[in-house]
Amino acid sequence: MTLLLAFFIGFFGGLRSLTAPAATAWAVYLGWLKIERPLSLIGSLPAVGILTLLAVVELVADKLPRTPSRTAPPGLIARIVMGGFLGYRARTALVKALNTRDIYIALVEDLVAIAGSLWVVSKF
């Protein structure tokens, strides 16, 4: 079960690079996830605040028209470091299959990343 949850948090991290670390920080802060020091510092109030702010900035910045593709070097490097890469292909395929604007799929992707990350960290 732990391996499956690790896969999922990596997948959600691939959708939004900073959502999974922010969800993990909240899980430690709220006592859902018990980890030892020094890793438990991720659950400190400053870390929770910073990671939450960065995750929100990422969610907003992704919707801006001038934001580069996640396959451009900055986005690609972040995804390689923080998680998986399958989300890009899924999002592109959904936009084409549903013949809709990218923003609608991006908003659904945000919800999946947030809810999925919170679900995974609540299981520990």
Image (spheres, grey):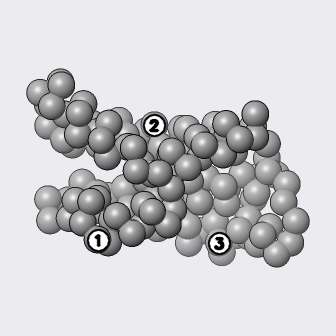
Please state, as top left, top right, bottom left or bottom right, where the C terminus lies in the image: top right
Residue density around tag 1, few if under 14, some if 14–19, many if 20 or more, within 10 Å = few
Residue 108: percent from left, percent from top: 35, 35
Residue density around tag 3, few if under 14, some if 14–19, many if 20 or more, within 10 Å = some
* 29 vs 38: above or below: above
Q: Are marks 2 and 3 in contact (CB under 8 Å)?
A: no
Q: Nearer the viewer, residue 22 or 2?
A: 2
Give the Cα distance between marks 2 and 1: 24 Å
Q: Nearer the viewer, residue 42 or 50?
A: 42
Identified by mark 2, the residue type is Val
Give the Cα distance between marks 3 and 1: 26 Å
The answer to whether residue 104 is seen in the rendering is no
Residue 38: percent from left, percent from top: 82, 75
Numbered disc 1: secondary structure: helix
Query: Mark 2 or mark 1: which comes first in sequence?
Result: 1
- Residue visible at 32% across and 72% down? 74
Q: How many marks?
A: 3
* 47 vs 99: above or below: below
Identified by mark 3, the residue type is Ala
Residue pointed to by mark 1:
73
Residue density around tag 2, few if under 14, some if 14–19, many if 20 or more, within 10 Å = some
Please state, as top left, top right, bottom left or bottom right, where the N terminus lies in the image: top right
Residue pointed to by mark 2:
112
* 89 vs 27: above or below: above
Q: Quadrant of residue 70?
A: bottom left
Give the Cα distance between marks 2 and 3: 23 Å
Residue pointed to by mark 3:
47
Numbered disc 2: secondary structure: helix
- Residue visible at 61% across and 52% down? 23
Identified by mark 1, the residue type is Pro
